[in-house]
Image (tube, rainbow, N blue to C red):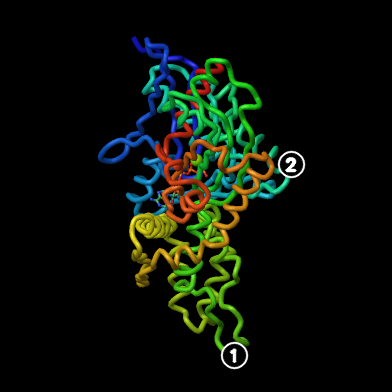
């Protein structure tokens, strides 16, 4: 009879997708993993989009702010006639001490409380599927948080993540590096020990671990020396999206467009507005009075006012999600085909442009070399040589990008590079670790 290990819960709170898993003991002594299925229109999904939607609503005669997360956030957002606020990539704010909170629909929210809302929904959905009360879990953390450049910023991000879990009703959480968790998920498929390199490429971060795993190691008990090293950087799928927005979308929304000659040919809209447009976590907060005033004034004096109007429509009607979807579709298609079309409609503006994979790879070339340097650095600091590695396991959504995979295919023979469970391996490994330590 399978028996649920009550406390063996793993939670992967991702920049783009989150998932929750529980380890289950089998009569054979092996462990199995069950993932939480989240309801969504027309079915269920194991990967819960890490988004929040807030909207003003009237309830029993009172005005209040309704908040939804995951698939239901997207559904409420799409159904709303007057759009509230959809927020994406909240995890990327954790390290930033200058951003402690934000005003949404006239109310102040701390970032921890926004993240906590999502975590509470993950917890309650897991509780209802598993029929248990969840107050503790093993939780993933990136090797390096997005934007964290110092040790103090890393510590700050961890504190905020812990605080968000506390607000969401957790009494104790154990943190584990996300790539190490992915390694434990891969380990469950092994019948012998291996020295492996894990690459976990998500929305916000790319993380690497070099470690020894396998049934022999589990049996003798893990030792600190089994983990040879971790490395990571706050650059992944969202950064690739930013390149697409910069190259294709921002110019159609007035980036580089000038004010009327009488105004000395200055840029119509300040560059920082486009910089915020490129980052999903900043885009959600562009709808402010200050930005509206800047754009209104730019519109009357711009040489190409229709582009400024399209930018105003995007911000005022909160079309960030549609933009995100259009960019995702292009990127996904470029992972499969040599060329694809970006198709984005914003009010009267219609943007259609074919992009080849080679062009896209040119746009992300700097990002790819930063990723490559991070991998090289891990081998240099650990003194391990590429030939010592038995297997390379790539996971996370961004590992679908052929140019990311190519970094490994150039260094290791093809038969050594594997991938799989792109959206669930971290949660699976976290649950297995929870079972191991409980
Ligand atoms: N087929 C694909 N081709 C290219 N990119 C993809 C594909 N599928 C998903 N992605 C990208 O993968 C990212 C999401 O991956 P994943 O769910 O592993 O991230 P995450 O765990 O939420 O983020 P993180 O681990 O950084 O916190 C997004 O940037 C998404 O655009
Ligand atoms: Mg991840």
Residues at discs 1 and 2 in contact (Cβ within 8 Å): no
Please, is residue 207 above or below residue 285 in the view?
Answer: above
Q: Does the beta carbon at disc 2 come under 8 Å from ligand 1?
A: no
Is 319 or 342 nearer to us in this picture? Answer: 342
Residue 422 is marked as none
- Residue at far bottom of view: 262
The residue under the point 61% across, 81% down is 266
The residue under the point 58% across, 32% down is 211
Residue 262 is marked as 1
3D distance between C-alphas at marks 1 and 2: 49 Å
Number of residues whose C-alpha sits closer than 10 Å to that of mark 1, classed few (under 14), some (14–19) or many (20 or more): few
Please, is residue 396 above or below residue 425 in the view?
Answer: below
Residue 52 rendering spot, x and y as whole percentages: 46, 44
Q: Which residue is mark 2?
A: 152
Question: Which of the two marks, 1 or 2, is nearer to us in this view?
Answer: 2
Residue 40 rendering spot, x and y as whole percentages: 32, 38
Q: Is residue 243 left or right of residue 75?
A: right
The residue under the point 35% across, 65% down is 339
Q: Quadrant of the C terminus?
A: top right
Is 353 or 186 nearer to us in this picture? Answer: 186
User: Is label 2 in a helix, a strand or a loop?
Assistant: helix
Residue 315 rendering spot, x and y as whole percentages: 47, 62
Residue 256 rendering spot, x and y as whole percentages: 54, 77
Q: Is residue 395 visible?
A: no
Q: Is residue 38 left or right of residue 51?
A: left
Q: Quadrant of the N terminus?
A: top left
Q: Is residue 86 visible?
A: yes
Is 62 or 209 nearer to us in this picture? Answer: 209
Please, is residue 138 above or below residue 369 in the view?
Answer: above
In primary-sequence order, the first of circles 1 and 2 is 2
User: Is label 1 in a helix, a strand or a loop?
Assistant: helix
């Amino acid at each position: 009879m399978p028996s649920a290990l009550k406390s063996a819960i793993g939670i992967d709170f991702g920049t783009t997708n989150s998932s929750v898993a529980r380890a289950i003991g089998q009569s054979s002594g092996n462990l199995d993993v069950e993932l939480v299925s989240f309801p969504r229109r027309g079915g269920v999904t194991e990967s819960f989009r890490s988004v929040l939607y807030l909207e003003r609503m009237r309830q029993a005669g009172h005005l209040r702010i309704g908040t939804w997360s995951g698939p239901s956030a997207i559904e409420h957002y799409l159904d709303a006639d007057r759009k509230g606020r959809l927020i994406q990539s909240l995890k990327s704010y954790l390290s930033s001490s200058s951003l402690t909170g934000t005003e949404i629909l006239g109310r102040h929210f701390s970032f921890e409380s926004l993240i906590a809302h999502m975590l509470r929904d993950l917890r309650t959905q897991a509780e209802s599927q598993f029929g248990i009360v969840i107050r503790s879990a093993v939780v993933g953390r990136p090797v390096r948080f997005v934007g964290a450049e110092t040790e103090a910023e890393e510590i700050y991000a961890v504190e905020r993540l812990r605080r968000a879990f506390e607000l969401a009703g957790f009494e104790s959480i154990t943190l584990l590096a996300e790539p190490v968790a992915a390694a434990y998920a891969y380990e469950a498929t092994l019948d012998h020990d291996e020295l492996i390199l894990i690459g976990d490429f998500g929305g916000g971060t790319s993380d690497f671990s070099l470690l020894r795993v396998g049934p022999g190691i589990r049996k003798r008990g893990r030792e600190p020396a089994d983990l040879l090293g971790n490395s990571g950087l706050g650059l992944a799928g969202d950064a690739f999206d930013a390149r697409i927005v910069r190259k294709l979308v921002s110019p159609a929304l007035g980036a580089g467009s000038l004010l009327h000659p009488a105004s000395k040919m200055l840029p119509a809209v300040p560059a920082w507005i486009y910089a915020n447009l490129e980052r999903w976590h900043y885009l959600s907060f562009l709808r402010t009075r200050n930005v509206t005033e800047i754009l209104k004034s730019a519109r009357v004096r711009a040489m190409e006012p229709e582009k400024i109007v399209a930018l105003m429509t995007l911000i005022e009607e909160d079309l960030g999600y549609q933009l995100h979807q259009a960019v995702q579709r292009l990127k996904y298609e470029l992972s499969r085909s040599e060329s694809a079309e970006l198709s984005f409609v914003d009010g009267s503006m219609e943007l259609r442009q074919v992009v080849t994979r080679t062009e896209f790879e040119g746009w992300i070339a700097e990002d790819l070399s930063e990723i490559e340097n991070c991998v090289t650095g891990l081998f240099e600091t650990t003194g391990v040589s590429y030939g010592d590695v038995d297997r390379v396991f790539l996971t996370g959504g961004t590992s679908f990008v052929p140019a990311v995979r190519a970094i490994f295919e150039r260094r290791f023979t093809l038969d050594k590079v594997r991938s799989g469970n792109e959206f669930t391996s971290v949660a699976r490994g976290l649950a297995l670790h929870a079972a191991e330590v409980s």
